[in-house]
Amino acid sequence: MEKPLSNTDYIFSEAIDGPFIIDLYAADYVMIEETFTDVLREYDDFVQRIITTYHENDVAALKSAVHKIKPLFGFVGLTTQQSRCLQMENTCLSMTPAQLAEAFPPFQTMLLEAKSIIEKENTRLAAFNAANR
């Protein structure tokens, strides 16, 4: 029988909303790791679609692409990034081209930095789960 894990066994990095994740997955760290792995598998395609639609000046498609990536951040406890996606999704259609040109680079940076956070947390989770099997 596997050793049951408690929510105090693993401490999420500061960027991750640990209590949210623990509650969402009922402290099932194997499932959490699997989810992080699944998110990483799809992440680059989602980000590339956002960048492409921005460079094509297709704001409706940009809004749709941001809408599609938004839940991924919730799945991995990046609730701040999820909120930023909601803000971009809700405002990009009403932005002038100049406003969007100003808002997009920091948004893109956030997307790229989030991948690194997810990768690092996934590595830590894998080590934690391997040590507790």
Image (cartoon, rainbow, N blue to C red):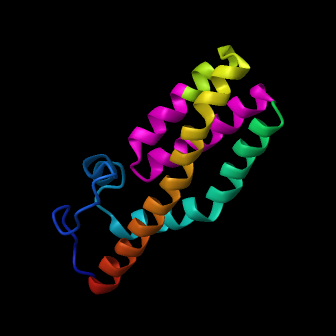
Q: Measured along the vertical axis of the image, is residue 44 above or below residue 99?
A: below
Q: Measured along the vertical axis of the image, is residue 64 above or below residue 10?
A: above
Query: Residue 82's x, y, as percent?
Result: 47, 38
Q: Measured along the vertical axis of the image, is residue 43 above or below residue 81?
A: below
The answer to whether any part of residue 31 appears in the image is yes
Residue in front for this viewpoint, 6 or 126: 126
Q: Where the C terminus falls, by quadrant?
A: bottom left
The count of marks equals 0
What residue is shown at x 57% (from left), y 28% (from top)? 88
What residue is shown at x 69% (from left), y 29% (from top)? 63
What residue is shown at x 46% (from left), y 50% (from top)? 75
The residue stretch that appears in magenta:
58-87
Query: Residue 10's x, y, as percent?
Result: 23, 67
Q: Where the N terminus falls, by quadrant?
A: bottom left
Q: Is residue 54 left or right of residue 16?
A: right
Q: Is residue 67 left or right of residue 84?
A: right
Query: Residue 45's x, y, as percent?
Result: 71, 55
Query: Residue 48's x, y, as percent?
Result: 72, 51
Residue in front for this viewpoint, 54 or 26: 54
The quarter of the picture where residue 106 lies is top right
Q: Measured along the vertical axis of the image, is residue 56 above or below residue 77?
A: above
The answer to whether any part of residue 1 appears in the image is no
